[in-house]
Amino acid sequence: MPPSAATPTAHSTPVSPVSPVSLVTGATRGIGREVSRQLADRGHTVLLTGRDPDAARRVAEELRAEAGTADVHPLPLDVTDDRSVARAAAEVTEAFGRLDVLINNAAITYDTWQRAVTADLTVVREAAETNLYGPWRMAIAFAPLLRASAHPRLVNVSSEAASLTNMGGGTPAYSASKTALNALTRMLAAELRPDGVLVNAVCPGWAATDMGGPGGRPVAAGAASVLSAATLPDDGPTGGFFRDGRPLPW
């Protein structure tokens, strides 16, 4: 699909050399939307992605108004679709030639109704396609653009539900896919360390989102936890698992 007029292209408004370029998956609501807003507030050029182009365009317009900046760009992206990911990577390459921050936030299926011993494996596979293979697909496609950055950061939005140390029963699709995402984080951190890419997993905490439900911490607090890893200094940690900047047990 050709880029729309609102999609960043080589003919978009030029990006300042000091303005970090950040891409957030699953950014049309919840944690992803708020992370995008906070990045824009910090002066980042934000590529706000979502599967629904109309929703991505609408939310980008809202955030531009809220942040008082033109540097929030909608970018249609389905992390479960190889062609969609490749197309997005090509558009970012053409428009910016680099990516400074990749935040793999898109996730599905907090399956509180399931137990591992009776799980519907179709549900588990569907969760893994977005929660594990989506970030993996993104890392493969965008690694060259991260390597082109002077200060690259890759953040995988995980969950304390993925901690083997504290794991019990329940939410098998979500917990298993996020645990695998943590393992992927460790591998990517080791492999991208020579390129200066800091790769970390972050738990935003139980936040009051569509997935988390009412009663959780404010979405802004959960997003700030993610932002702490996206804005690490060059001598910051890599290959870690954090919430609010503090290590979590694997």
Image (cartoon, helix red, strand yellow):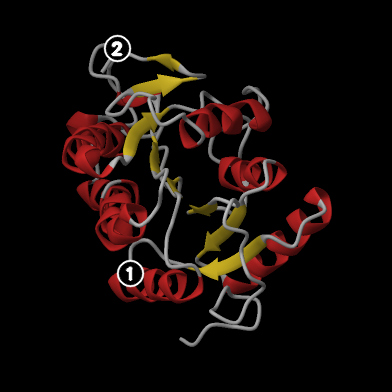
Crowdedness near tag 2: few (<14), some (14–19) or many (≥20) residues, C-alpha within 10 Å: few
Residues under numbered marks 1 and 2 in contact, where contact means CB atoms less than 8 Å apart:
no
**Dot 1: element:** loop
Q: Residue at x 30, y 40 (%)?
A: 196
Residue type indicated by callout 1: Asp
**Dot 2: element:** loop
Crowdedness near tag 1: few (<14), some (14–19) or many (≥20) residues, C-alpha within 10 Å: some
Residue 10, horizontal then vertical, whole percent: 54, 79
Q: Earlier in the sequence, mark 1 or mark 2?
A: 1
Residue 81, horizontal then vertical, whole percent: 33, 69
Q: Which numbered disc covers residue 81?
A: 1
* Residue carrying label 2: 166
Q: Residue at x 45, y 50 (%)?
A: 100
- 136 or 110: nearer the viewer: 136
Vertical relation: 56 (above or below) 131? below
Res. 28 in view = no
Q: Residue at x 35, y 57 (%)?
A: 148
- 158 or 6: nearer the viewer: 6
